[in-house]
Image (cartoon, rainbow, N blue to C red):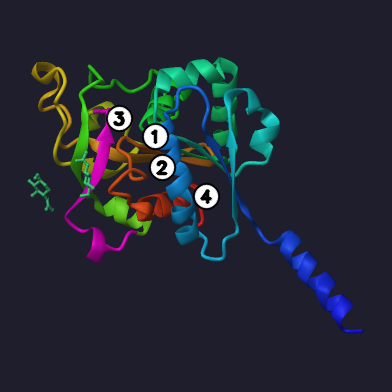
Amino acid sequence: MLLLPLLLLLLLNLATATTTRVSLYLGSGTSDNDNDAFLANLPIALSQAFPHGDYTITTFLEDEFSNDLLTKTDLLIFPGGSGNGQATALGDDNLALILSWVNAGGSYIGTCGGSFLGMSHIGFYGTPTPTLQEPWDRGSGNVSVEVLDVGFEELALDRDIFAGNITIMYYQGPIVKPQDLPSDVNMLAMFRTEIATNHPEETMGEMINTPAITSKEVGKGRVVLNSPHPELQPVVPEIYAGEILWVLKLV
Ligand SMILES: *[C@@H]1O[C@H](CO)[C@@H](O)[C@H](O)[C@H]1NC(C)=O
Ligand SMILES: *[C@@H]1O[C@H](CO)[C@@H](O)[C@H](O)[C@H]1NC(C)=O
């Protein structure tokens, strides 16, 4: 006789427990390689952020994007590829919808192409959008990234593990000089080495001491943009775990 009320209580608890709903874009303008890395490593980061497993990941293509999807989303993630390609696939109206959704309290994480999308197309860092260093196709490889104090605080990273330089894969993400960012953009981590394989006469010296990871409070929402790829080898899931908790205002 006691079992039924207990069962009801349990069901009620499950129904009311907060689940973080992540929507990950895998449509035009993304790359199969990076999509696979997100599908493999985002769950690791989410499990670090939510040890009880109370999260869901929904993937969507451009024609599955809608206001209805946003109402069922707590965190939007745009992976690498081409920021232009992603912007074209989604279209201006949807980009404006994402901006107003974040302003109203939504959370956005963009990496490489998704960072270009956030900075240069959605306009999270203001308009006119920040000047980026050109040409963008400077090459790829592992780079040294140093987390700054504000990064340690926002991302709740363990200083014993992440002090000094950490190695992250870079694949032609946006490079922006600190002085070209509005003052309300936080610089969480800096590039300490560079990639200038392509167009070295123009790209050499541009990348060192520019921000690798930035964040901003956008209206009632929060945004983190990664220029490099913590989801690619050598994978650093702790960075995403920290970013996820920060953009969701859980820290
Ligand atoms: C980057 O570093 C990781 C681990 O140190 C290594 O597995 C990977 O092959 C490197 N990537 C490149 C492109 O050198
Ligand atoms: C990070 O790497 C750069 C370039 O190799 C080096 O100059 C700097 O001292 C390193 N920083 C730390 C904290 O180890």
Nearest to the observer: residue 6 or residue 123 = 6
Nearest to the observer: residue 31 or residue 225 = 31
Label 1 CB less than 8 angstroms from ligand 1:
no
For label 3, the crowd category at 10 Å Cα-Cα, with few meaning under 14, some 14 to 19 and many 20 or more, is many
Q: Earlier in the sequence, mark 3 or mark 4?
A: 3
To which residue does mark 1 refer? 33
Label 4 CB less than 8 angstroms from ligand 1:
no
Q: What's under tag 4, amino acid-wise?
A: Leu
Decide if residue 251 is in sight here: no
Left/right of residue 88 with respect to residue 201 in the rendered view: right
For the point 88% across and 84% down, the residue is 2
Where is residue 166 shown, x and y percent of the image?
A: 21, 51
To which residue does mark 3 refer? 173
Q: Earlier in the sequence, mark 4 or mark 2?
A: 2
* Numbered label attached to residue 248: 4
Q: What's under tag 3, amino acid-wise?
A: Gly
Of circles 4 and 1, which is in front?
1
Q: Compared to 81, does 24 lie above or below?
A: below
